[in-house]
Amino acid sequence: MTEGQITIIIALLGLVITVIVNVTKFATAVSKIETSLNHLNDVLKELKEEFKDSREEMAMKRKRLWDHNDKQDKILDEHELRLTKLENKEGH
């Protein structure tokens, strides 16, 4: 082998090593990104479930408030009716 061939082989080996190192770094980075995305996906699922539960709970609370409001309206209407009857009795 000549000195020129040895230089070319060394240069090619250097190129191969550089490519392998960079591909390894890239694969490691992709793996970390994939792990992070999987974690974020899990967190997102949990948050969606919590939001769904919260919406259902708020809907139940609104229904209870409206039911209570309807009950109070009925009591107020009955009270108004009694007052009106009393005022009419006193007026005659």
Image (cartoon, rainbow, N blue to C red):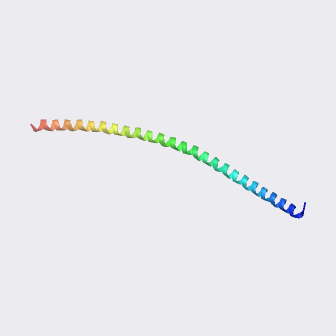
Residue 81 x, y percent position in the rendering: 20, 36
Work out which residue is located at the far bottom of the displayed protein and give it: 4
Q: Residue at x 30, y 37 (%)?
A: 70
Question: In the image, is 64 to the left or to the right of 25?
Answer: left
Work out which residue is located at the far left of the displayed protein and give it: 92
Residue 76 x, y percent position in the rendering: 25, 38
Question: In the image, is 21 to the left or to the right of 86?
Answer: right
In the image, residue 81 above or below residue 25? above
Q: Residue at x 51, y 43 (%)?
A: 48
Q: Residue at x 62, y 48 (%)?
A: 36
Q: Splitting the image into 4 quarters, where does residue 58 fall?
A: top left
Q: Quadrant of the N terminus?
A: bottom right
Give 43 or 14, whichever is nearer the viewer. 14
Q: Quadrant of the C terminus?
A: top left
Residue 31 x, y percent position in the rendering: 67, 48
Residue 56 x, y percent position in the rendering: 44, 39
Q: How many marks?
A: 0
Q: Residue at x 86, y 64 (%)?
A: 4
